[in-house]
Amino acid sequence: MNTPLIYLHGFASGPASTKARYFRERFAGQGIALEVPDLARGDFEHLTVSGQLAVVEEVAAGRAVSLIGSSMGGYLAALYAARHPEVRRIVLLAPAFGFARRWPESLGESALASWRETGWLPLYHYADRQERRVHYRLLEDGRLYEDYPAVSQPSLVFHGRHDAVVPYSFSEEFARRNPAAHLEILDSGHELTDMLDHLWREASRFVVCCEEP
């Protein structure tokens, strides 16, 4: 495979997540290197969408890459592809479309007001396995970006029917707006870790199938 392949982890996650390790190991078995950057650069407290996109841009370095993204990483992959026509293909796993719009709905007015006033929101960080905090700038910056990026590249999207974090209807709307996107609704939740073998088979076939010899 000649096209560089980059995996983008989810929110409050990291390069050592279950899916990141699984995909990296499986691609390595095919002699393919999967790059998995730390999108937070070790500074989760000051995480922003813009900062994460800057990390993707640095790693991609103008190359014709393919992207695999999980949850927020899937949203970032779509945002990046919409702004970089050199991207070849993207695979999105329960992508967090409507990222900024969904925070008020999930937190509620009181918690949102507290976040805005204090500047900080405490939450559980899955990679660190402890409570961390993130600055309100994440939400302010996130509002600068569209809910559904206009992606012209071929896109393969997987979403769990029982996803309680990001409803699969968001991926349905993305697929409706982007004719080059193929959506598969799975009998799973947000993590999709019970579908890893299926995700691997379909994703690897999708990103490798059209490589030039």
Image (cartoon, rainbow, N blue to C red):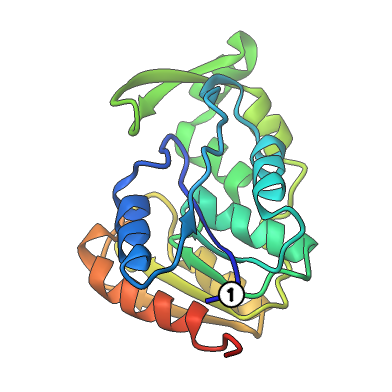
Q: Residue placed farthest to the left in the image? A: 194
Which residue lies at the image location 72% right of the left edge and 49% below the top edge? 57
The picture places residue 72, in percent across and down from the top left corner, at: 52, 48
Q: Residues within 10 Å of mark 1 (few under 14, many from 20)?
A: few
Q: Is residue 33 left or right of residue 152?
A: left
Residue 97 visible in the picture: no
The picture places residue 127, in percent across and down from the top left corner, at: 34, 33
Which residue lies at the image location 37% right of the left edge and 57% below the top edge? 24
Residue 150 visible in the picture: yes
Residue 113 sits above or below residue 102 on the image: above
Residue 71 sits above or below residue 195 on the image: above
Which residue lies at the image location 78% right of the left edge and 63% below the top edge? 84
Residue 178 sits above or below residue 101 on the image: below
SS for callout 1: loop
Residue that carries the numbered disc 1 in the rendered image: 2
Q: Quadrant of residue 144?
A: top right
Q: Nearer the viewer, residue 33 or 5?
A: 33
The picture places residue 22, in percent across and down from the top left corner, at: 29, 57
Q: Nearer the viewer, residue 209 or 143?
A: 209
Which residue lies at the image location 55% right of the left edge and 45% below the top edge? 102
Q: Residue placed farthest to the top in the image? A: 118
Q: Quadrant of residue 112?
A: top right
Q: Nearer the viewer, residue 64 or 14?
A: 64
Q: Amino acid at mark 1?
A: Asn
The picture places residue 67, in percent across and down from the top left corner, at: 56, 63
Which quadrant holds the C terminus?
A: bottom right
The number of numbered badges drawn on the structure is 1
Q: Is residue 133 left or right of residue 125?
A: right
